[in-house]
Image: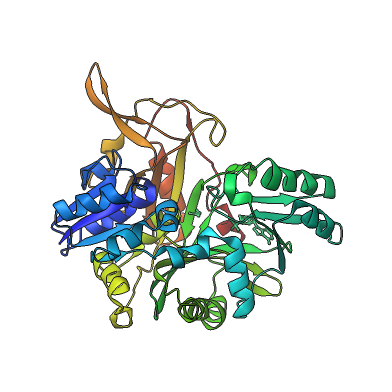
Amino acid sequence: MKILLVGGGGREHAIAWAVAKSPRCDKLYAAPGNAGIAELAECVDISVMDAPSLVKFAKEKEIDFVIVAPDDPLAAGVADAFLDEGIRTFGPRKNAAIIEASKAFSKDLMKKYDIPSAAYETFTDPDEALKYLETQDAPYVLKADGLALGKGVLICQDLDEAKEGIKEIMIDKKFGDAGNKLVIEEFMTGREVSVLCFSDGKTILPMTSAQDHKRAGDGDTGLNTGGMGTFSPSPFYTDEVAKFCEENVYQRTIDAMAAEGRPFKGVLFCGLMLTPKGPKVLEFNARFGDPEAQVVIPRLKNDIVEVMEACADGTLDKIDLQFEDNAAVCVMLASDGYPVSYKKGFEIRGLENFKDKDGYYVFHSGTKFADTEDGKKVVTNGGRVLGVVALGDDLLEARANAYKATELIDFDNKYMRHDIGKAIDEQ
Ligand code: AMP
Ligand code: GLY
């Protein structure tokens, strides 16, 4: 088949790596792709949001199967644009991607269908939100309703901070229209675990678990980022927790979406918190996580294209989803200063060290090709630059391997956290 992958980050590089090794794939295109994906696919310079150009390209090239990976195009209906033209596509329609794109929608869905989550109220009027806050105890959890690059959640330690937060989100519109509605949620405590699930709208198959490190600095300090590293599996996702979530979260959510006339086909990302009162849903995403995909996909035994086709075709009940009995750790190499301000355009050295190195991967997040005096070079082109991933028999070995592998790569202003997977030591 000819396959088109829409996206251009580390998650898409991991997907492209798995798709390119599938016997089902004869030719892979990526729009827009990046310097790493370019080794596996022909990259075409079309924006992920430009549905008309993407569809035109797919028709011209007679693409058989499309994978839409990032959140923004899914929320904007880019999967619909392909599906409406009769092109087989992996990724939810807009009316199902709303489970990520509107926190108010997902909270209402969970309440209606008895899916465990934090208590909440939704507001469109900042004065009403302020009045409600005064009846609640700290800490306060404020969530902008819409997509905000994973930064639309504020945890406020006192009332003054929370009042300022309401102003930022609803009045100053720090996250744009995402702040037209506000969800105020009960504060919960516990370990966080991410479970990504394949679904065809009826059947849901959970993948192996993972955990992200969202804060920029060691010891979970500093600002929230898109994710500074991940490990998989999570030792805290026990058989008992898995059983609870299978009974109370995954299937129930897919059935709820179908009952609402919004069948969900694609990857449902369940962000869970393991609270003293049992697992509860923090959030749903309508896609693979980034950098969760970078540790989950290398452990997948199945042909990813076959699984994605089954999601699109409604035949996921025929798939026996399997993961290796090993572990993976991803350490993000970022540009110093991320997520606030940082310089780009520095040459990246050492990428060749990962060629044919079994059990080691370097997935590009923010890179591009640049012409230099010595020819074409790969340079830094974003806050998060590369995800260095290593496998191991267990998490400790995977972590040691991943940190050793970070030394193989060098660029000016290289920054990383040194405690990715540290929670494992507490086991
Ligand atoms: P979300 O984008 O909804 O997953 O929120 C981002 C992060 O904020 C989560 O990964 C949690 O660390 C934290 N968070 C979100 N909701 C809550 C909550 N109700 N109680 C405590 N922490 C939360
Ligand atoms: N790593 C979190 C996300 O992709 O939303």
Vertical relation: 377 (above or below) 235? above
Counting from the top left corner in percent of width and height, residue 326 is at 39, 64
Residue most toward the right? 135
Indicate left or right for 390 with 420 as reference. Answer: left
Q: Is residue 76 visible?
A: yes
Task: Decide which of 82, 141 is in the foreground and name it.
Answer: 82
Q: How is the image coloured?
A: rainbow
Vertical relation: 206 (above or below) 129? below
- Placement of the N terminus among the 4 image quadrants: bottom left
Q: Residue at x 43, y 35 (%)?
A: 382
Q: Residue at x 51, y 61 (%)?
A: 100
Q: Is residue 234 visible?
A: no
Counting from the top left corner in percent of width and height, residue 292 is at 45, 56
Indicate left or right for 143 with 203 as reference. Answer: right
Counting from the top left corner in percent of width and height, residue 78 is at 35, 56
Counting from the top left corner in percent of width and height, residue 426 is at 62, 60
Task: Decide which of 82, 137 is in the foreground and name it.
Answer: 82
Residue most toward the top? 373
- Placement of the C terminus among the 4 image quadrants: bottom right
Task: Decide which of 147, 378 is in the foreground and name it.
Answer: 147
Q: Residue at x 80, y 53 (%)?
A: 127
Q: Please tell me how many numbered marks the rendered image carries.
A: 0
Q: Quadrant of residue 87?
A: bottom left
